């Protein structure tokens, strides 16, 4: 079975949350598979709005799994408090 984009997004979120010891539902609070600025700053409290906008490559106002993965690979995410 080929993993879907949503499955891969769940894996990325699970990896992020495991790193900081948080449940995935705490990061993606509404469960839509996308991360809003408030959701992401709950996980990365030092993330500025300017940095969040830079993560949002397609400028749709949300960070999707592709954008999150790209940001991780580029080292664009700040350290967590975990």
Image (spheres, rainbow, N blue to C red):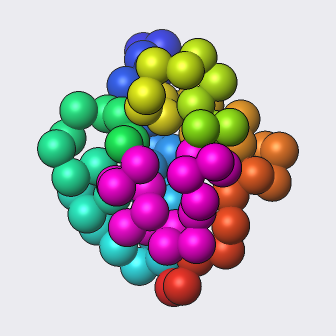
35 with respect to 19 (left or right): left
Query: Residue 72 location, x and y as percent?
Result: 71, 49
68 with respect to 17 (left or right): right
Q: Quadrant where the N terminus lies?
A: top left
Q: Main secondary structure of the magenta part?
A: helix
- Residue at horizontal 36 percent and vertical 43 percent from the top: 36
Residue 28 against residue 16 in the figure, above or below:
above
- Residue at horizontal 81 percent and vertical 54 percent from the top: 75
- Residue at horizontal 59 percent and vertical 38 percent from the top: 53
Residue 73 in which image quadrant = top right
Residue 10 against residue 43 in the figure, above or below:
above
Query: Residue 15 location, x and y as percent?
Result: 51, 57
Kindly tell me whether residue 69 is visible in this rendering. no
50 with respect to 2 (left or right): right
- Residue at horizontal 58 percent and vertical 72 percent from the top: 46
Q: Residue furthest front?
A: 50
Residue 5 against residue 80 in the figure, above or below:
above
60 with respect to 81 (left or right): left
Residue 72 against residue 20 in the figure, above or below:
above
Q: Residue furthest left?
A: 30
In the image, residue 49 lies in the stretch drawn in magenta: yes
Q: Residue furthest right?
A: 74
Query: Residue 30 location, x and y as percent?
Result: 16, 44
In the image, residue 23 lies in the stretch drawn in magenta: no
Kindly tell me whether residue 1 is visible in this rendering. yes
How many numbered marks, from 0 up?
0
Along the viewing direction, whichever of 1 and 17 lies nearer the viewer:
17
Residue 77 in which image quadrant = bottom right
Q: Residue furthest bottom?
A: 82
Query: Residue 10 location, x and y as percent?
Result: 38, 40
Along the viewing direction, whichever of 16 and 74 lies nearer the viewer:
74
Which residues are drawn in magenta?
37-52
């Amino acid at each position: 079975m080929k993993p879907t984009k949503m499955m891969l997004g769940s894996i990325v979120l699970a990896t992020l949350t495991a790193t900081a010891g948080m449940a995935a539902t705490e990061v993606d609070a509404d469960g839509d598979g996308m991360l809003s600025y408030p959701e992401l700053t709950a996980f990365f409290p030092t993330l500025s709005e300017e940095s969040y906008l830079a993560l949002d490559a397609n400028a749709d106002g949300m960070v999707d799994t592709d954008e999150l993965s790209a940001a991780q690979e580029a080292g664009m995410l700040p350290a967590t408090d975990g």
